[in-house]
Image (cartoon, rainbow, N blue to C red):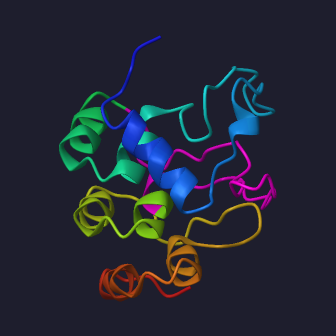
Amino acid sequence: MKTIPGFVVLVALLFTTGFASPGHAGVVSPCNGSTTLQQGLTDPLIGAAGSGLLEEVKRLIREGHDINYQECEDVSRSDGTVLGIRGWTPLMIAAMHAHLDVVRFLVGAGAKLETKTSNGETALALARRAERAEAVALLKELGATK
């Protein structure tokens, strides 16, 4: 298995913000049947965006990774509470972690602002819920309305 830069950073961010659970390691994804080591790693673009690794995000997009890829894993809190959010994108996770340079790049490169998760939340709604005022302001500046 190839290791992506920022893996440790991503995992640390997911655990410290309460969006990951150690109980999901090795869970078979209901979407594609793959075994993932941790949520958000079925595509390295999700990991790079969530870790704020702008150059890695750029490289992955140049290599053909889908800028609007939607993750299939549930988002969970560190206490094991499943939030039931599926369909989050690189833009959503970058916004939730206030990686503003990544957000700006993704939108400029064609990331869809109004894509929704399985429970109807956009990147703007997720940034609001995560109380990331800078990300909320940037997304609005870039044209997000919902």
Question: Taking 131 as reference, is 31 above or below it?
Answer: above
Q: Residue at x 22, y 34 (%)?
A: 59
Question: Taking 5 as reference, is 139 above or below it?
Answer: below
Q: Is residue 68 left or right of residue 87?
A: left
Q: Residue at x 64, y 25 (%)?
A: 36
Q: Residue at x 50, y 84 (%)?
A: 131
Q: Residue at x 31, y 82 (%)?
A: 138
Q: Is residue 145 visible?
A: yes
Total marks in image: 0
Assess whether residue 66 is covered by the magenta stretch.
Answer: yes
Magenta span dominant secondary structure = loop
Q: Quadrant of residue 2?
A: top left
Q: Is residue 126 left or right of residue 22?
A: left
Q: Is residue 45 visible?
A: no
Residue 139 in the image, given as x and y percentages of width and height:
37, 80
Question: Taking 17 as reference, is 78 above or below it?
Answer: above
Of residue 103 and residue 19, the one placed in the foreground of this image is 19
Residue 76 in the image, given as x and y percentages of width and height:
72, 54
- Residue at the outermost top position: 1
**Which quadrant would the C terminus be assigned to in this image?**
bottom right
Residue 69 in the image, given as x and y percentages of width and height:
52, 44
Q: Quadrant of residue 65?
A: top left
Question: Taking 136 as reference, is 64 above or below it?
Answer: above
Assess whether residue 125 is covered by the magenta stretch.
Answer: no
Residue 102 in the image, given as x and y percentages of width and height:
28, 59
Instruction: Specify start and end residues of the magenta stretch as a single range.
Output: 65-91
